[in-house]
Image: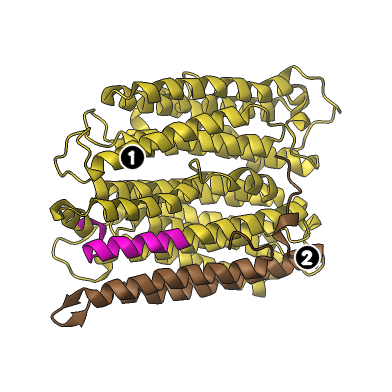
Amino acid sequence: MPAYILELIVVGLGLILLLLESFLPRLGAKGLAAIGSVGLLVVLFLLPSVTGAPSESTGIIWKFYSADSLALFYKGLALITTILVLMMSVVYVPVMQRYLGTGGGVGEYLILPVFTCAGLMWMASANDLTSIFVSLEVVTIGFYIMVAYMRRNVGSLEAGVKYLILGAVSTGFLVYGIAFLFGVTGQTNLDVISTVLGLLEGQDKIILFSFALLLVAFGFKVAAVPFQMWVPDVYQGAPTPTAAFLSVGSKAAGFIVLSRIVDAFLGDHGVQTGDGSYQDQIQRVLLVVAGATILFGSLAAIPQTNFKRLMAYSSISHAGFILLALACAYPVRMDMASGEVVAFYLAAYLPMTMAAFFVLCIVRSSRGEEEISVLDGLGKRSPFLAFVLLVSVMGLAGIPLTVGFLGKLYVFQAALDQGHFVLLAIATLGAAAGFYYYFKVVRSMYWNAPSDQDAIAVGTGSRVLLALLAAAIIFLGLNQGIILGFLR
Amino acid sequence: MIIRRSALVILMCLEIMLSAANLALVAFSRFRLEAGLPDYDGQMLVFFVITVAAAEVAVGLAIVVALFRSRRTIDVTTLTSMSH
């Protein structure tokens, strides 16, 4: 079965869900989410059985689409993320209904992630400028709606407008970058572009110009400094499941495309570091952006009091670490390719972030706030929720024995192998700042006196999922071979 | 675009940005002749961009309408409810 069938199944699933929502309204949010998650789980199990491009080119689709092991890995990440987001949305539905008014259903909110998932999966495979553009927009437009979904809530609308305007500007940069890359190479397929770029001489300025435009567009997607200004506001205003989806799904897809583009530009053209060629300059720009992103994300997170804003800045700082891994792509000197370091980090980031946002969803649906102070005394009121959140922030901070530690370790190794000592110092500073601001959450849960004593009700399904996520954070941290096994 | 205050005008400016990029694509494909014909890869991409831009503006207008309904203004400089 060719790999692109998977995206067709996911889109078909979304259409079926839309029909069910219209014709069987008594299905309710739970029914829709259950059908959606089961469908996506089936696709997840089909994932290992798909085949890549046939050896002789038989269809035009393989000009736009690739199905290497990295693409399949990111497809798996997209599917798991979407299933978790659907589950989270069910918990969040009571909060949303308060802001929808009469005649506002939540059905679409549970169906849009399925369509967005198809876009994310397609992004993982896109290897042509055309398919990159279209799949990226499928994802972005889905997110515009999900961010602004609570249409009677001022924060959600404000976040929606901000995301819309800045997202559309980044689309403009993307198309302009694509236009110049097409202009200088005359090709749209990334593999062919890489070959053509290796043969071009004396075109460095225009190549760098097109790369800069593309970096702006993808810097926006992955929340890299200086294109990060939308992140805190959008995370704070958007419905919590959407913030989680943005933080994991959108970032992972942005990074797979960015790493494909960086690969196309750097290629294996046999250029030495430090010779002033455009490859060298691209690498240097990536290093500077990575360092600025780590610094900004880590330092700006320190004074935050809103949990979602804290997660937003933490997501920026994690993007910095991933960018650092990406910048160490060239020349490859270690036993792990930089694409694998990036994929490993993102796979580690998934359960940690999802667990944190899941706990926040549950707390939010019982208490109407998202400040860190609502977690006060959670260790006494709901020891289970507090424990899951503890494991998740430990992972995010990168404490040993969690999967987050391994992710950071590989990034540090890559930077050390390449001799980027300044970046190494910045990354250490960022990780140390991380300990401090994640500790604020732990302190609030276990040291501060609770404002009320009632335990927070947690459904059985949520309990099982949270336990699974917490187990994954520790288990994957002890057996790094599992994620690497999926990668190869 | 950056000096405008109305969300509606900003959306229009975004469309102009995309049109500019489209124009660049068409121009590049026109100047790269293959056997006397333009390179149609670029022009194919333009059709995708036009379609996507239409979808984007449809969603954008819906969000602006929702914004107007709840706040009675679409002036983007008033969108400052979140802490910094």
**Residue B6 placement (x, y as % from top left):** 69, 66
> Disc count in the image?
2
Q: Residue at x 36, y 52 (%)?
A: A47
**Residue A408 placement (x, y as % from top left):** 42, 26
Out of B26 and A318, give the one closest to the viewer: B26
Q: Magenta stretch containing residue A184, yes or no?
A: yes
Out of B7 and A275, give the one closest to the viewer: A275
Disc 2 + disc 1, Cβ < 8 Å:
no
Secondary element at tag 2 = loop
Can the viewer see residue A114? Answer: no
Overall secondary structure of the magenta stretch? Answer: helix
**Residue A183 placement (x, y as % from top left):** 27, 65
Question: Quick check: A17 left or right of B19?
Answer: right
Can the viewer see residue A336? Answer: yes
Q: Chain A appears what colour?
A: yellow
The quadrant of the image that shows the C terminus of chain A is top left
Q: Residue A430 carries which label?
A: none
Count neighbours of disc 1 (C-alpha within 10 A) and say few if under 14, some if 14 to 19, many if 20 or more: some
Chain letter for the residue marked with disc 2 in the picture: B
- Amino acid type for the residue under numbered disc 1: Phe
Magenta residues? A172-191
Secondary element at tag 1 = helix
Q: Which mark is residue A486?
A: 1
Q: Mark 2 points at which residue?
A: B73
Q: Quadrant of residue A231?
A: top right
Q: Chain B appears what colour?
A: brown
Q: Residue at x 21, y 29 (%)?
A: A333
The quadrant of the image that shows the N terminus of chain A is bottom left
Q: Which residue is drawn at 30% across and 53% down?
A: A49
Chain letter for the residue marked with disc 1 in the picture: A
- Amino acid type for the residue under numbered disc 2: Thr
Tell me how far mark 2 sits from mark 1, CA to CA.
Answer: 51 Å
